[in-house]
Image (cartoon, helix red, strand yellow):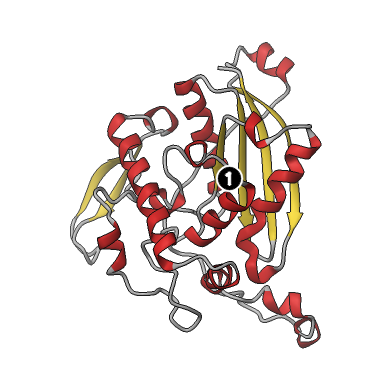
């Protein structure tokens, strides 16, 4: 994530850019967050308040050791000093570095808007961090898992994809989740835990309120605002986290969902078998 480019290396062909939705795909993610905040009246204060709770939950979970069974410690070598030019030393990475303990409304209110050219609601405190990370799961037939003697953690039931206007791509889960539940004749009340990505507090607040979800069921260990949102990692990280939380709390029916740049949403349904 920290090494990724901010923009597409080659611009779209001029003919493509004549189509409004295609042109909107070029909007930076921060701009889409400001669009969501403006279009749906989600204030800076509301976004900060949501973010304080994300940090609080992550802090509680980390201090209680709830993340430990979903993290594989990695031994690596890093360069010392704030400028990265000091002597190398060996470290073991065993916990997320993102959670900021003791985050308050007061501390978040002091952070300047991150995208003043687009709006004044999204900040470094109420948006996902620039974080590096990796996650992995193994998916196979039940018969193969039994043959190999592997523990079965959950059943992957299915997933849906939905489209939304690219300029408000963050609201994708608000469309994908109902579509998923409809496929399997389920209601919000039937789901024990939701994991919804927190690319920005604006989209998380919108999706939760639009769907009428119980806030206590959504991201019980905090989300990407506190933990980070590495591209290509978050979807799998959500699965690891929701299975770990289901194991701890003995919950059964689980839904993960994410927004996707260029205007998509995706949601997956899992049944805990631990």
Which residue does the image show at 57% across and 29% down from the upper left? 192
From the viewer's perspective, is 115 left or right of 9?
left
Circle 1 is placed at which residue position? 235
From the viewer's perspective, is 163 left or right of 94?
right
Q: Position of residue 191 (x, y in %)?
A: 62, 31
Q: Position of residue 260 (x, y in %)?
A: 64, 58
266 is higher (above) or lower (below) than 192: below
Q: Nearer the viewer, residue 6 or 109?
A: 109
For the question of whether residue 36 can be seen, the reply is: yes
**Res 254 → quadrant:** top right
**Res 31 → quadrant:** bottom right
Q: Nearer the viewer, residue 157 or 2?
A: 157
Which residue does the image show at 43% across and 76% down from the upper left? 120
Which residue does the image show at 38% across and 56% down from the upper left? 49
For the question of whether residue 159 can be seen, the reply is: no
198 is higher (above) or lower (below) than 178: below
Q: Position of residue 66 (x, y in %)?
A: 37, 30
From the viewer's perspective, is 242 left or right of 68?
right
Q: Position of residue 245 (x, y in %)?
A: 47, 29
50 is higher (above) or lower (below) than 185: below
Q: Quadrant of the C terminus?
A: top right
């Amino acid at each position: 994530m920290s090494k990724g480019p901010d923009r597409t290396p080659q611009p779209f062909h001029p003919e493509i850019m004549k189509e409004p939705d295609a042109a909107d795909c070029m909007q930076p993610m921060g701009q889409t967050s400001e669009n969501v905040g403006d279009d749906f009246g989600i204030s800076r204060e509301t976004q900060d308040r949501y973010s304080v709770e994300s940090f609080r939950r992550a802090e509680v979970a980390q201090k209680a050791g709830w993340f430990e069974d979903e993290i594989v410690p990695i031994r690596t070598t890093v360069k010392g000093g704030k400028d990265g030019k000091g002597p190398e030393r060996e470290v073991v990475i065993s916990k997320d570095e993102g959670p900021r303990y003791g985050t308050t409304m007061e501390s978040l209110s002091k952070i300047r808007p991150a995208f003043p050219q687009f709006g004044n609601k999204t900040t470094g405190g109420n948006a996902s961090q620039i974080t590096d990370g990796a996650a992995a799961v193994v998916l196979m037939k039940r018969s193969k898992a039994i043959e190999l003697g592997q523990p079965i953690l959950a059943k992957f039931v299915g997933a849906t994809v939905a489209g939304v206007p690219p300029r408000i791509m963050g609201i994708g889960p608000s469309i994908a989740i109902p579509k998923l539940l409809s496929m399997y004749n389920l209601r919000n009340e039937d789901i024990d835990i939701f994991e919804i990505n927190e690319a920005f507090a604006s989209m998380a607040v919108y999706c939760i309120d639009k769907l009428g979800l119980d806030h206590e069921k959504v991201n019980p260990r905090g989300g990407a605002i506190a933990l980070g949102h590495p591209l290509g990692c978050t979807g799998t990280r959500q699965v690891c986290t929701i299975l770990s939380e289901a194991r701890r709390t003995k919950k059964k029916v689980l839904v993960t969902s994410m927004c996707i740049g260029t205007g998509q949403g995706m949601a997956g349904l899992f049944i805990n078998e631990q």
